[in-house]
Image (cartoon, grey):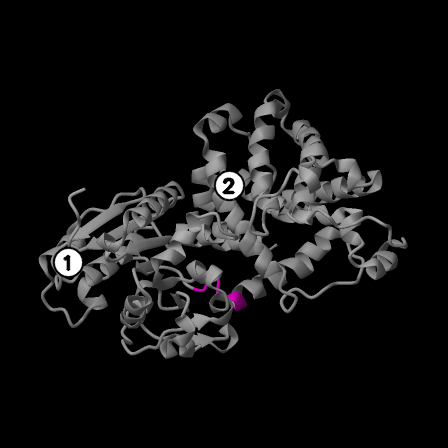
Amino acid sequence: AVGHVLLSQRNDLRKRFATISGLDETICCQWIVLFLGLHDIGKFSESFQNLRPDLREKLQGKKSGNTYYSVRHDSLGNLLWIESLWHSFEAATSASVPDFRNAAEYWQELFQYIANAFTGHHGEPPRRNGLNDLQLRLSAFFSTEEVTCASQYMHDLQVVLNKEIGIIPQLPSPINIYDSNSIPIASWLMAGFAVLCDWIGSNSQWFQFCESVIPLDEYWRNHAIPQAEHAIREAGINAASPEATASPFTNLFPDITEPTPLQRHVIECPIADSPQLFILEDVTGSGKTEAALFLAKRLMAHGLGNGIFMALPTMATSNAMYDRVAKVYRKFFSDDSSPSLVLAHGARHLSDTFMRSIADSSHAQKQYGTDEDTASAQCASWLSDNRKKALLADAGVGTLDQALLAILPSRFQSLRLFGLAGHILIVDEVHAYDPYMNKLLQTLLSFHAALGGSAILLSATLPNH
């Protein structure tokens, strides 16, 4: 439900998923929401149910068995999809889309990328092997009854989604999608989206348990969707939308009456419709920061991003830049928005300015107009309680390593990658990094561009090589 609401509210997110995956927007949204509904399907296994034998006996009337929970439910869900649910999905889809079965081999491989992304929502890919590196077998973890129940749940969920989102139209050729490698690329974005939806949907304060036995469509309509809308507001996600038109440079920086040559260039340079990479090189004092911020604002107004993240070499420079960005970041967004500005580095709790900005979204400060230069920074408390969420904020300033973690083999890197994909990435002092960091930065820029993101690099002294 969280994913459905987010996709319904965010036209840019729907378009990004559809463009990258090569799928029709309706198809893409339905399959994403379907797999969000299946992301915890491994919890149908007896080994997981036995973690709460009291609830198992109450709900199913069964005593606890001796099954040991040796494989996590995310990997069990992936196993269930591979060995059972895919075949049920193929049969159901083929009944409504006759051409599906003719290319089932291609679709199966493409859907495996999607299944891996959504079942890997605990920060790492699902495992195919268990203890002693032995391949997992479905019969070792699921009874026939549990497989049947999981399959019935998937069928019921598809019925609900067909009513909510619409019947899948004509499918494109899976061979073209397979050859373009678009689904593997989109799976990185899907993995981050799955983590975000799981973290919001798993918050028991926003989603209370429901003991009443009610039809799935009634639960979806009367409980899940309203709770998801409330949770998203409380989390501070989708709290801001970019300003629709690019305002003059002096609106953003009224103290600058005469722009420098570099600033004049970013005011006048053309903006393409595809992801952009700008490199701004000029002497110290030429106003590169102001030029980059205004250029980012133009890119956002052009539909190439819905936020910014400014990366710097050190915590000290990040703290100083945070204070500068706090004065102007609200002007990047519409007047009715409530954007969050986050400081992202390991010692941000020592910044009094940032700690004062953290507010529960239900007690958010009164909206400020774009002419209010002294409006203080604000950050939703849910976004600020973990650095892994930092790149989800509407605007952010932090050390470069916080962005580089999006392409390193670290847990929940996909969440960082997803948050960054919708932002304009600004990297200051780009000349200050060693060859190792430069290589990581190149990889980050490649991923960012592949997921539809734009970037701006700043330096006063770029090397010749």
Whether residue 212 appears in this view of the structure is yes
Residue 378 figure quarter: bottom left
**x and y percentages locating residue 291 in the rendered image:** 19, 59
Whether residue 11 appears in this view of the structure is no
- Residue tagged by mark 2? 187
**x and y percentages locating residue 270 in the rendered image:** 20, 46
Residue 326 magenta-highlighted: no
| Residue at 53% over, 68% down | 234
* Kind of element beneath mark 2: helix
Please tell me whether the stretch drawn in magenta is mainly helix, strand or loop. loop
**x and y percentages locating residue 10 in the rendered image:** 46, 53
> In the picture provided, is 281 more to the left or to the right than 119?
left
| Residue at 27% over, 51% down | 434
Among the two numbered marks 1 and 2 on one chain, the one whose residue lies closer to the N terminus: 2
Q: Is residue 217 above or below residue 130?
A: below
- Residue tagged by mark 1? 263
Magenta extent: 234-239
Q: Amino acid at mark 1?
A: Gln
| Residue at 35% over, 52% down | 305
